[in-house]
Image: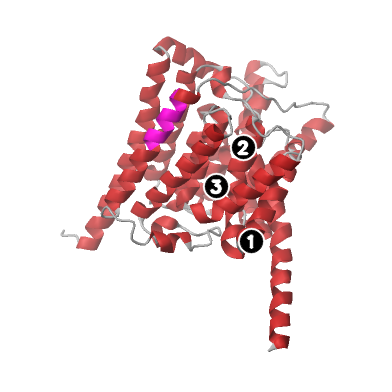
Amino acid sequence: MNLSREQKNTKVTENTKVIFFVLLGLMFIGLAFMYNTLSEICAGCIKIITSPANLITDYIELSNVGATLMNAGIMLLVSLIMIKANGAKINGILIAAMFTVTGFSLFGKNIYNSVPITLGVMLYAKLERVPFRRYLPQALFGTALGPLVSEVSFNIGFSTWTGIFLGVIIGIFAGFLIPPLSISFSKFHQGFNLYNIGFTAGIIGMFFMAILHSMGVEVQIVSIISSGNNKNFGIILYLLFVAIFLFGLFLNGWSLHGFGKLLNLSGRAGTDFTEMSGVGLTMVNMALLGWLSTTYVLAIGGELNGPTIGGILTVVGFGAYGKHIKNVIPIIIGVFIAKILNVYDIYSTTAILALLFGTTLAPIAGHYGIICGIIAGFIHMAVTMNIGYLHGGMNLYNNGFSGGFIAAALVPFFDSIIKIIDARRIRKV
């Protein structure tokens, strides 16, 4: 059977995306052996899998660099296999999901605490009698609740097998809740919070935390953070983004033609840059966001550790689904102004994460303009630093949780201001 040129190009493009992510996963695995021996990596991976993983648990500090990179590489390849095994096309949201899973596998996610969540989403799809691929984004992003599984399994005081059994059951139940709730909650913020599953996971985590508290179980938010790896990680990240940039240019015919059109997209949830601007320009955009994020962390004297690198990779991933230089910069400015004026240490990992993940509100800047984006970023800094106790660190996407509330409050306000201004203009005419 002969394929048309368009069909061949589509097939090649999909194969190329698969090869890209396979190489990316193998890169993480290969880098692991540059830092640690096989025995050290295996011991570190066991520690990662059997430890509570609530926010913020930097796996580099918890175990070692090699085990952390191995965990990230494995999680990426498993995500890719799951996507292709279910016959899904790698589009913008799945690119964002795979980068997010990879990034958070440096601090909080692992194969043990992610599988029950995925099984829960799969069970929901089966009961609804729809293909699992329809809920792949929810399954991948939903692993934000992985710490809930780890906490119940290893840190509440149950015997080993009882804890594992209860952790898996609770994880499956939490995963089962994600699809219906995420669909409903997307209407709450009208797509102006890109981390919709983060908001959903925050609500679910909040209810589970309330139940645990009512049973006398106290869960503490932790801060296990590494330092001293800026030089090596900086080189790795910059080289990675150079490779992605060149790859994007190659796919776009060694041209930036059409990039201006991409920058004019608002980025509101549902904006798939791979479909609207092509894979090549999407990769260019992702690389630019990577350079911007990495440079910011280094420029202010922050640390490139598990959480901050995870934040950088998440920003890069959403360069395929909603974020670009034009709509993230106002958010960054707003968060940075807030950091200067508030009592928090602007160099701390927590504050840096607020800035990186605060770009979940980029669609507000893209739709309403620079000033509104700065306001959103400013408010985000205050909210995200004071909302984590609600879910007790059980939701890794804390900024997505706060972003949902901020977008839900600001969007109607901005809309009303616009209506008032438009009404006055009409009266003058």
| Magenta-drawn segment | 232-240
Mark 1 closeness class: few <14, some 14–19, many ≥20 residues within 10 Å: some
Residue 353: image tag = 2
| Secondary structure of residue under mark 2 | helix
Residue 138: image tag = 3
State yes or no: discs 1 and 3 in contact (Cβ < 8 Å): no
Above or below residue 371? Residue 391 is above
Three-letter amino acid code at the position of disc 1: Gln
Above or below residue 71? Residue 127 is below
Q: Kindly report which numbered mark, 1 or 3, lies closer to the viewer in this rendering.
A: 1
| Secondary structure of residue under mark 3 | helix
Magenta segment, prevailing SS (helix, strand or loop): helix
Could you tell me which quadrant the C terminus lies in? bottom right
Identify the residue under disc 1: 190
Q: Position of residue 167 (x, y in %)?
A: 64, 28
Three-letter amino acid code at the position of disc 3: Gln
